Image (tube, rainbow, N blue to C red):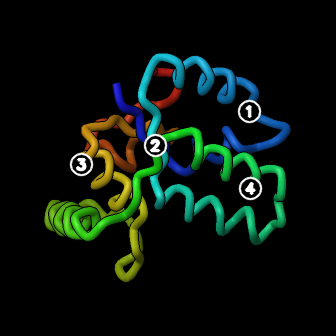
Amino acid sequence: MRLLLDTAVVGEICHPRKYDDVRAWFARAAAAHEMLLSEVADYELRRELLRIDSRRSLDRLDELTRELRYIPVTTATWRAAARLWALQRKAGRVTAAEGGLDGDVLIAAQALAEDAVIVTPNTRHFDSMVRAVTWQEV
């Protein structure tokens, strides 16, 4: 199974002191599944780690970009995300602020393109767009 990691999960994997359970899961899951890292998740996490000057977490994030298959944002991703965003809005589901970029829709578009399941603590953010599970469900 292909697993695309959401920003929150990547953040827990990169944290230097907490989330031993998530890091242990990640090591087991990486041996059994193809793990994917979204460029969107990298951006969302990296900007915060830079803001708080978390060098150890940034170093681990850099390692992940070399260890996992890194999924860039392409023109096709942007277009698929725009379609998803419009469909969500037409159905009355608001996924982000009106003028917001909406990283979750971008990540969902990447998961659809890669035939991947999103691993996230916030499955409700993705349920109406793509299959999403918590790390405990993998």
Instruction: Tell us which disc is closer to us: 2 or 4.
Output: 2
Q: Nearer the viewer, residue 4 or 94?
A: 4
Q: Which residue is mark 3?
A: 113
Q: Nearer the viewer, residue 63 or 27?
A: 63
Q: Residues within 10 Å of mark 4 (few under 14, many from 20)?
A: many
Q: What whole-number distance in Å separates the C-alpha atoms at marks 2 and 3?
A: 14 Å
Tell which circle, 4 or 1, labels the residue nearer the N-terminal end: 1
Residue type, label 4: Leu
Residue type, label 1: Tyr
Residue at x 56%, y 64% (from the top left corner): 43
Q: What whole-number distance in Å separates the C-alpha atoms at marks 3 and 4?
A: 27 Å
Q: What whole-number distance in Å separates the C-alpha atoms at marks 2 and 4?
A: 18 Å
Residue type, label 2: Arg
Q: Which residue is mark 1?
A: 19
- Image coords of residue 48 (percent x, y): 69, 65
Residue at x 53%, y 18% (from the top left corner): 31
